[in-house]
Image: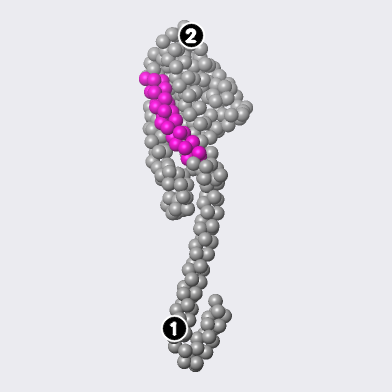
Amino acid sequence: MSSMLRFFSKIRKSLLDEGKVARYTKYAIGEIFLVVVGILIALQINNWNEARKDRVQEQELLLQLKGEYESNLAELDQKIKMRNKIIVSAFKLLEYQDNSTKREANDIYKHLNQISVTPTFDPIINDIISSDRIKLLQNTELKKLLTRWTSDVTYVTEEEQQWAKYRSERMRPDIMKYTSSRSRFNVYFNSNLVEDFFLGDDLEVEFDLGDSKRKQDINVVFEQSNLEDHVAIAATWSRLINEQSKILRKRILEILDLIEKDLE
């Protein structure tokens, strides 16, 4: 650009020296036009480069989001599965509640342990909104879903926290009062319920506390505690949270579908 300007300067000086004002005026206008065109071309090239950089960053962000929401989906499915187990155990305990002749101590302890599980969804919350990186995304529908993600998660996690509070403060103390913790926890490990605690489908932990040698009557927990109420609440809460989780699961699938389309 500087060499071009020097070239134009020499021509302009030559025309002025020769007194050719009209020709100089036309030339000056042409020179200005060429300079403006050059500037516009340079700006356009710069804009193209910036747009290309933004698209590269957008693809990187989309890949990051894809991994995060696939992880969120896997964790959510795990928690739904755990709550389904709670529901199954709750109905089994209600069956024992209604029919005392079917009661079997170890199986009752197994189901008591299962309804005491507190699944909590702890998803990855991306910082793209607070960091303003969301502007890199061109898909307006995707941006809308990502913006709503935190509030969508809150609907599920608030209910989970309420259930965890109820279980810890009301149900668990009542169950512990009328059952043997040693026998109950021994069944917990022998029936491999520990896999729900560690979220591992193939996890096995060898740990044997042995059954309590104290005389115990498992019927007491049904007759003197509020077990029936606790079990009904555990089943109801688990079902309601799972219904909310299914809505959240649908939202994750929508996000992943939009990401996949933008990555193609």
- Which residue is label 1 attached to? 25
Instruction: Give the answer, above or below, for where 168 lies relative to 218.
Output: below
* Magenta stretch secondary structure, dominant: helix
Q: For the residue carrying disc 1, how many other residues have a C-alpha within 10 Å: few (<14), some (14-19), or many (20+)?
A: some
Residue shown at 55%/19% (left/top)? 211
Q: Relative to residue 202, is residue 32 drawn left or right?
A: left
Q: Relative to residue 232, is residue 10 drawn left or right?
A: right
Measured as percent of width and height from the top left, residue 252 is found at 47, 37
| Label of residue 177 in the image | none
Looking at this view, name the residue that lies furthest to the top: 101
Circle 2 sits in a helix, a strand or a loop, which is it?
helix
Instruction: Give the answer, above or below, for where 137 lies relative to 4.
Output: above
Per the rendered image, the range of residues in magenta is 229-257
| Tag 1: amino acid | Thr
- Residue 173 visible to an observer of this rendering: no
2, 146: nearer the viewer:
2
- Residue 79 visible to an observer of this rendering: yes
Picture colour scheme: one colour
- Residue 104 is covered by the magenta coloring: no
Residue shown at 42%/13% (left/top)? 97
Measured as percent of width and height from the top left, residue 230 is found at 39, 22
* Distance from Cα at disc 1 to Cα at disc 2: 109 Å
- Which residue is label 2 attached to? 102
17, 32: nearer the viewer:
17
**Dots 1, 2 in contact, CB < 8 A:** no
